[in-house]
Structure formats: C-alpha cells, structure tokens
Image (spheres, rainbow, N blue to C red):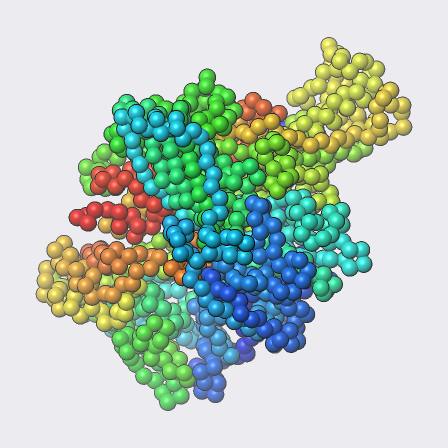
Amino acid sequence: MRVRMTVNGEEVMRDVEPRTLLVHFLRDDLGLTGTHWGCDTSNCGACAVWLDREPVKSCTVLAAMASGHEVHTVEWLERRNEFEGGAPGELDTVQRAFMACHGVQCGFCTPGMLMTVRALLDRNPDPTEWEIREAISGQVCRCTGYASIVKAVQWAALQERGRGAS
Amino acid sequence: MQVPAPFEYERATSVEHAIGLLERLGGAARLLAGGHSLLPMMKLRLAHFEYLIDINDLHHEWGRIVVEPTRIRIGALARHRELLENAELRRVFPIFHEAERVIADPLVRNRGTIGGSLCQADPSEDLSAVCTTLDARCVIRGSGGERVVSMAEFYRGPYETAVGDAEMLVEIQLPVRPGGSSAYEKVGRRVGDWAVVSCGVAVWLRDGLIADARVGLAAVGPNTTGIPEISQALRGREPSEDVYAEAGAIAAASCTPVADQRGTVEYKRHLAAELTRRALRRAVERARHEAAPVGGR
Amino acid sequence: MTAEPTFVDNDQRPLGHGRMLRKEDPRFLRGKGRFIDDVQLPGMLHLAILRAPLAHARILSIDTTAAQAHPRVKVVVTGEMLAERGLAWMPTLAEDVQAVLATDKVRFQGQEVAFVVATDRYAARDALELIEVEYEPLPAVVDVRTALDPGTPVVRDEQPGRTDNHCYDWEAGDAAATDAAFARAEVVVRQELVYPRVHPAPLETCGAVADYDQAERTLTLWCTSQAPHAHRTLLAGLIGLPEHHIRVISPDIGGGFGNKVPIYPGYLCAIVGSQLTGRPVKWTEDRYENLVSTAFARDYVMTGEIAATRQGRILAVRARVLADHGAFNAVAVPTKYPAGFFGVFTGSYDIAAAHCAVTAVHTNKAPGGVAYACSFRVTEAVYLIERLVDCLARELDLDPVELRRRNLLKPEQFPYRTATGWVYDSGDYPATLAEALRIADYDGLRREQAQRRARGELMGIGVSFFTEAVGAGPRRHMDISGIGMTDGSALVVHPTGTAELRVSCQSQGQGHETTFAQIVAEELGIPPADIRVVHGDTELTPFGMGTYGSRSTAVSGAAAALVARRVREKARLLAAAMLEVSPTDLVWDKDSADGRFHVAGDEGRHVTIREVARYAYGSADLPEGVDGGLHAQLTYEPPDLTNPYGAYICVVDIDPATAVVTVRRFIAVDDCGTRINPMIVEGQVHRGLTDGVGMALMEMIAFDELGNCLGGSFMDYLLPTALEVPDWETGFTVTPSPHHPLGAKGIGESATVGSPPAVVNAVVDALAPFGVRHIDMPLTPSRVWSALPPSR
C-alpha cells in the first residue's frame, strides 16, 4: 500500500507492506538510521520518535498509521534551530546538553532520549527532577545510570530559560 | 525485533464505516486504536488478524471527555495521556489520574486508548479495575444500534469481552453521585510493569457515614462486581481504621490470586487487603473534603 | 521553580588528563552512529534463525520444503547441512563445543535449529514458520541442585562415555588450613547465597553482517564483537579461511557488558549464508534471542562460611559453589581459570586461611555464565564475602562498618598476597572507607535509623567494600583459547603534526576515542582534537584481546601511554638534531600546550612536536642511525592484574506493609588509581550502580520446571528505569597502581561488582528487627514480604 507522510519537514511517499512498522520504514525505507530498536515488547524506547510532535514508540506504530501525519526523528533536531529561530548549524540545546553533561555513552538510547526530552522541555520549560525521570521512564539506558541524562535536561532547561527561548 | 505476519490495512472514516468493515470481514478483522495492546501481541505472533481497521481518525469525535451533571462520558478513543491530564476528570474521579500515573509509561500513554485497554481485557489491566470501581457502563455499537452494558457484563474472561465481532465499544459512561470520591493504589515490581495487585476504591459519604463503597481489584482474578460484600459491610458505617481493615479483609477473601513471578498467593492476598485499606482511607479523606459535585445535588 | 543545579565544570584542559568532553558524542547526538543494523550493503540479504521451543528434545525430522518454496527465500540451512561442511559444532571459549545448529537434539529452549536467508527481514521471519520440525520431548534438567543426582537425564550425551551432567571441578586455597581454622574458631556463621541468573541485556542486541567474496575467498564480517582480533583468529580455525583473508569490523556497539565477547552461532550462520548465496547477509537478533540464548551471567548457588573470634577478627572463609553453566560450557574466561577469578573471595580483608570448591554442571539452559561486568566472577566472589561479613556482624552484634574496620587490609600490607594466592597491587582502604562514611554521614544515618525504627519505619543501611581484579593479563597466566591477553598499540604522527592512535581494544560506550586521545596528549603534547583513535577494525589496528574485564585502561591504556613515550623518545633524538645539542641536554616540557623540548637552561631554544614531525618527514638530513617518520608500535604485556576497589553505602526505605524497596541514596567512593577522565569514570560508576539496583531488586532469568525460559522479554526481565534509581553520590580516592605506566587501574566493572551486596545488605539491615538474616536476590516486594515472620 502507499503511505504518504511528512518526515522531518519533508513529504515522503513510499509503497510498503501494511504490516511495516514505522521504525523499519524510517530506518530501511528512508535510510534514517538514527532511530534504533532494542526489544520486542515496546519496553525499551530506543525507537522513540515524534508523531504529530508527541514522542511515541515507533516500533508499535505502523507506517500506515503514520500516513497523513507528521513524523520527526533525531536527524531533525539539529535543524530545529533553523526552523525555530535559532542559530543554523548549531546542535539543538538538548544535544549540546547531553554532550556537556556526559549523557551519552554507547549512543544507542540517545536518539530516543533526545526526542523525549526535547518534547518535555517544549511543554514544560522548568521540569522538576521527578518530572524529568518520569518523562524518560519508558526508556532504558544501560550505560549512564540516568543521573547524567537528568542533569543534561536541567542544563538545557537553564540554558533555554536564560536565553528567553520560546 | 519481532514483526507481525502479513495483514491488510483499512482506515475507518466513521464508526459506521468501521462497523461495516467488521461485518464484511468478520472475525478475521480487528479494530486498531492505539495499537499498544494489539501490535505487541501480533509482533510476537501470539495473535493474528488478517485485517486491521485503523480507527484513530475517529478520535476527534470519539476521544473526548464530556462532563455532564450526572455522568462523565469518555470516548473509547480517549488516550491514556488525555485521561491523565484532564483536570475535570481528575476533580470528579481522582482514581483516573492516580491509575493513569501508573499505567505503562509516558510514551505508551501518548497512544494507548481506554477502549483498547478495556477491549484487550488483560486480567492485570488497570482501567478495567477503575471502571469496575466506578460502576461504569460500556456503550457498544453495532449495525443494529447501540447497547449499554455493565462492567460485569462487559468483561467475560481473560482477553474476552462482550463486544461482538461486528461491534465497537464507543463510549464509557461513569455515573456521578454526590458525596463521593475515589483513589487508586498499585504495587508493581517496577514502574510500568503489570500490577502485582492494584486496587481502586470509590466511596460515597452522607452525613459523615459511608453511603456506599465499591472496590475494583486487578491482577488477582476476575473482579467486575465491585465486591458487593464490601458495599454491604460498609454501608451506614462511620469511616475508621477498623472499617478499612474490615474492607481489606473482605477484599483479600474475595480474590483468587495465582502464584507467578510477580508474587506468591499469600503476598497478593495481603496486598489486596492493604491496598484496599489505603485506597479507602484516601478516598474517604477526599470525600470529606470534597466540594459540591458537578451540577450540584 | 527548581533549585539551581550545580554542574561540575568540565575543565577542558587543552591537553592530557581531565574532564574533557567526549570527541565521539557528535555522531551519536546527531543519529549518525554506525551500528550493525545500520550497515547496508548492495544486494544484502537477511537471516533469521529458527529456535527450539523445548528445553530438551530429540530432533526426529526437519522439513524445509515449504520454506524453500517461499518466493523471497534464497536458502534454508539445517544442522545436517552444516555437518556436511564440518560446521554443525564449534569450539567454545572454554574448551568445550557448542552446536551451531542442532543435529541430534536440542539442549535448551531457544537453541538454534535452522536458518533462512531471505530478501528482507519480514520475509525471513515468515519463512521460519514454514519449517516443520518434529521433536520428541525429553525430560529437562532445570534445577542445578539435582543435576548430578543419579538417574537425571544427561544433557551432553553426544560425548562418548558421558554418564552425568558434571562439567568440571575446581578449587583454590588450602582446605586443611581452613578446616583447622574453622575447628578452632569461637564463632562460625554459615549462609547459603544464590546469585541468580541475570543477563547483561545491552540495548543493542547481537548481530553481524557477513560479506564473503567468492572470487577473492575473503570474508568481511561486521560484528557486535568486543574482541574483533580474537574473533578473527578463532573464526579462521572454524570456517577454514586463512586469517589474513578475514576482516572483522566492530563498528559502533550499543553496549557490550560481556554479552558481546563470545562467537555466537548466528555469526557463523551469517557467514555460511553469505558463502552459499554469494551476497552479504545480515543477522540481527531479536531481544528474545538475546535474552534466551546469548551469554547470561552468574547463576551461582553458594554456601559460604566465615570463622572469626568473638572480637570480630576474621580467621577463615570457606565456600562451596554449584555453578550452572547451561547446556555447553561457553564461558569466556582465561584458560587456567575455569571459575574465573572467583578465588578473590577473601575480599578486602586480611584473612589467613581460605578454601573454595566449585562444581560446574550442565543443565538444559543457554550456555554462558561469565558476563555482565563480572570481572570473571569477581561479582560472585564479592557478593559472597560482603554478605558473609554482614551476617557475621549480625551474629556478633557489631556494626558492619566496625567489623570491616577490624579486618580491612592496611596500606602497609600491600602488595598483599591472599590466602588463595592472589596479589593485590595497592590500596589505602581506611582512607576510602572514611571518605564514604563522610559523604554519607554514616553516624547521622544510624541515628536517623534508630529514630525511624522507633516509629515502626523500615530504613536500612548497607555497606560494601570490594576489591576488584582486572586488567588481564600476563601471558603465562592469562590466555583465552591459547591467545595471550596482551594488547598492541600503534601511534603515527603525520607530517602536519596530527596523529592517529590505533588500539586493539574496542569501545562499546566507554569513551575510548576521548580517553585514549587524552593519554597520548598527556605524553606528547598534541591536543586531543588532533589525535584520532582508530579501533574496532582488524584491518586497521594491531592485535589485542579486546574490551571486557575492565582491561581497556589497564592494558590498552598502558600500551597507548608506552607507545606515545616511544614516539616521544624518537622525537627527542630528532629535536636534539634540530637544536644541535645532545639529547640529554633537552628537557621535555610536560606542561606546555604544544609539546615542547627545550634546551636545558635556555627555554628560548625550543622546538614543538609539530616542528619535529615536519622535520621527521622533511628533506633535511637526519641524525645518524635514525630513520624518517614519527611512529611506533608495541605490544604491552601487563606484569600483573590491577586492583581497583571501593567503599559503597546504600540507604533504603521499605514500605512496612507492601514491602516495596526504595533506594533512597547510594554513596560510591571508588579508587581506580589515576583517573584519566573523571567525567567518564563517574559515568562508568553510575552505570554499574544501576546494574546493582537492577540485580538486587528486579532482574532474574527464571525458568519453569519444564525448562521454559521465563525471562525472554523486557516485560519479564525487568531493567531499572530513571524512576528506580536515586541521584548517585560519588567520591574518589587515588591509590595509583605501582605497575601501570599511568598508575591507572580501570573502572568499568567496579560498580557492578560492588553495588549488589550494598543493596542487599541494606535491605537485610532494614529487616534486622524481624530477625531476617538473608534474602536472595532479586528482592522483589513479594520476596521481601515473604521473608518477614508471619506475625507481621
């Protein structure tokens, strides 16, 4: 069947089997391999992307279900600044935050974490530590022990409040 | 990652369209809402349907939470996150907010729906317990019209509901009675896990005494009756720790837990009692401080 | 409004050691990492493996006709077909053999039975369902405690003369001296302790892309391997290709933790698939496959005994272990240490006599046992001793910290030889303990506990003082499958003054591209940004034994430092020629920002490393006996293991009615010797502490009585999320390793080793008023509650 959706701001159209999972569509059909997968049972969250600007587990969404909708992946984040009035060519604040606070080790959970925390800060610019932990509670990291990810989000929030970002 | 066997996909444009497709395709077709109950089972190939009918486009009409004077109507396509964040729902039925907080995780809650959860009818599923506690009515639509059933009629057994092959759950109706409040307690081995035991309690006070009480347990055997023995035991009583303990004891005796990796039978029974006590205590405190309910007495 | 968080500034020193931000981060942050499943080659096919549904069964027949007829299937392979190529069985890392595809029978649920290669992963998965296998179920051996009973089914009946499930026996220490010490002792405490089967569960599952070139008879294998060179050498023997025709590439790896050390049947299947089809073949396993069939960890049933005086002086410790190795012995351990380094079970204490006996058995479960940051069974050893010490403290009514104080090794005792023959290199244990107690405010915690107890609340404080043994190791003691555990390192400085360091170890997230650049920067004065660290590709890097057992810093880090020093020594000769002085008249300016040699007493006369490089490749005459270029290569053989150690304190609160355990605080003070990048060190510690909470409270690969694996998904094998762990409180002391060129010891597994006993000790401490002495992991609410007396 034919699916047509907007991915990272661009319209795409492909023929896929109806059972094609969104994560495979993104990775294999569109070559956007930044989104990962790590489990069989919708637990690990390595596959998190935005569907209509809400973080979802793309392993549990059919490409067919996303047809007609808007999808954003980690590859879009570094261009978010361009779209949202920041400095082009600069990584998004949450990306810089993960680097500044050692929120990345093996990098496998990172894209999913970034999409979720970006959505969190877009809705809640001043989250408490508990709110940050809860926001990422559907995603597993086997490397960082979470504390540095929490600090990265707090760093990003401070940066954006300081800049008076939208 | 595991992937489902092949199937065909249709997107419904209306409830009638969805029901028409179900009629035409029969038991080989299944409605697809949030997909977070159905798709995992199909990926593991524990279940298979040759046709999936995507009803997400119906969310604008069938995903709303409508507050009326004597009832709240929740569209079957309302997402867990919407139920969690709805302020009116939280004010009238705090049990929803407390239950949704401990259902799955934030990403799953962005997609999963109340209809999907109820229709999957997993014995550990929390919203079934919530709806039982609140004496919900389930509105089921078929080509012949609409029928309304109680939770006891809705839930037929593990993974089995009263919704027929060519029918669709469209709405959940929750009666609002004055003087009441509610609470939810859940113990899990970890955040997002199915409950070891969870317990919903709704209680109504009149003149400081308990007018009525309902308890809905999850994960300890079938429970869609609201445990009438507890209602009987508590009616007319003044709330106290002894009364809560009595309710807990009845809850523990009324359930049929099974030993598994989540816990022993004894522990689950113990939890049934303890969580009933806690939820009842909190529901009573809330009812005592409750402002006048929606629409007045 | 949140309180302003404080962030330790990354000091971003221009060179050398320090909290440098990671060079490898940008690609991961941008989604440009290159993991196995990201590898796409023209014409690539996909492989799926059919796995046994039963734990123990004879294979009566396999019919692949329908699968072969699937329009998108290229080839279907069974064990019988592999047997014709001599590949149905392969050697393991533990001198046993393992089935690649089952032939006679299946020996664990999830074992590989057949595979298909198809055009895409969906078709491959569909085709599995078209393979018909007829099984004759056999009774399964599931309980390690009865696996040696007479009449138990024999798992390894393919071995001639085999009549039982015995795998091996191993012992260490002096039984007679230990028995004598126990006989004399005033106090003896005995405790059975189970370290359940757990799984490293890296977020990225295992996989490979095999690309066999039929014309050249060469193989390129992309693979989730923590030891690419070892895999290449071992594969050469297996598949009959000469080693110089094999290239193994480990690209970015999404976590290893020991899970990606072994060679798995799936890799072999991908290679055979590529050989048969003449096209690249990709295999990436499901999470089910990962949890059910790949290297699990632990599964030790231990009985420990500790003997002491009434005053709390430990005299001896004794351990009997029943080890479940699964259907095949496939542990990744140095050859001479079948039970790994379990011999360090005397822990951090001055114990005169000790003896342990390990009996390993086969069961109908997946092979493995050594993984999940265990430092080759140090996790088990530390758990045993730290729990025994706490049990002894309870028996003597002594504070567990005080009991440890009375027995901890003293600084002047190092290097210390344990009663089982292990040598610890260095340590100032009292200082590290004191730092942990200070950060935790231990006395304050005990006072708080007393107050809470009086109110009926359950608060527990658990202590763990662990000593690690890592950095394997000297060749004559440490080899895996006959390959000595040394690491090579090669450094080249280019004419324009930038450099490449080629290391044999492989990063799965530990930050090697940064820390190794820092090591070289410290030695050579070239900024880390100008040093590229190359790793993971056997074509591009010198031979070494890979990353596990916390050996990267200890072994490859040493190699990197020494190779950089060798380059610096050549640079000295060149600099001397440039400045027309004798090499001994030059001073290496360690703190300069540009790697300077200056003439002694005349700092104005100097050359930078960049200028030296230009000269090395330039046109001017070189000094006599010195050739051009600026590079070096060496292989480093560690003289011994290193012994990082630490003092951990865990604070828990337990709901008295539901028995839910909450980890309120965790204080971890680690001593890993010299800390090259403290930011990365802390990250490694945070990870291990999370492992500990997970293992202590929720992780277990369980089986039912039929041998069905109950931990085959993340719904059942539970991993901690951000809501289960506190904000970690870390501290450090520095006791350099006397034999490591940088004084560094390694840190990768310390926290995984040291934290589980701290959590368990805390829970048992909380329940002390009820007389609870021990509860086995995982401490789920049900298991904690069930340990309470019925009257509760």
Residue found 42% across the figure and 35% down from its top: C356
Comparing C769 with C524, the one in front is C769
Comparing B99 with C194, the one in front is C194
Number of numbered discs: 0
Comparing C587 with C351, the one in front is C351
Splitting the image into 4 quarters, where does residue C674 fall?
top right
Comparing B108 with C340, the one in front is C340
Farthest residue in the top direction?
C601
Image quadrant in which the N terminus of chain C is located = top left
Splitting the image into 4 quarters, where does residue C47 fall?
bottom right
Q: Position of residue B280 (x, y in %)?
A: 20, 59
Residue found 41% across the figure and 56% down from its top: C152
Residue found 26% across the figure and 49% down from its top: C785
B185 vs C445: above or below: below
Q: Position of residue C312 (x, y in %)?
A: 30, 25
Splitting the image into 4 quarters, where does residue C62 fall?
bottom right
Q: Is residue B256 left or right of residue C704?
A: left
Is residue A162 in view? no
Q: Is residue C791 left or right of residue C77?
A: left
C746 vs B42: above or below: above
Q: Is residue B195 left or right of residue B42?
A: left
Q: Position of residue B41 (x, y in %)?
A: 46, 69
Residue found 58% across the figure and 32% down from its top: C477
Is residue C768 in view? yes
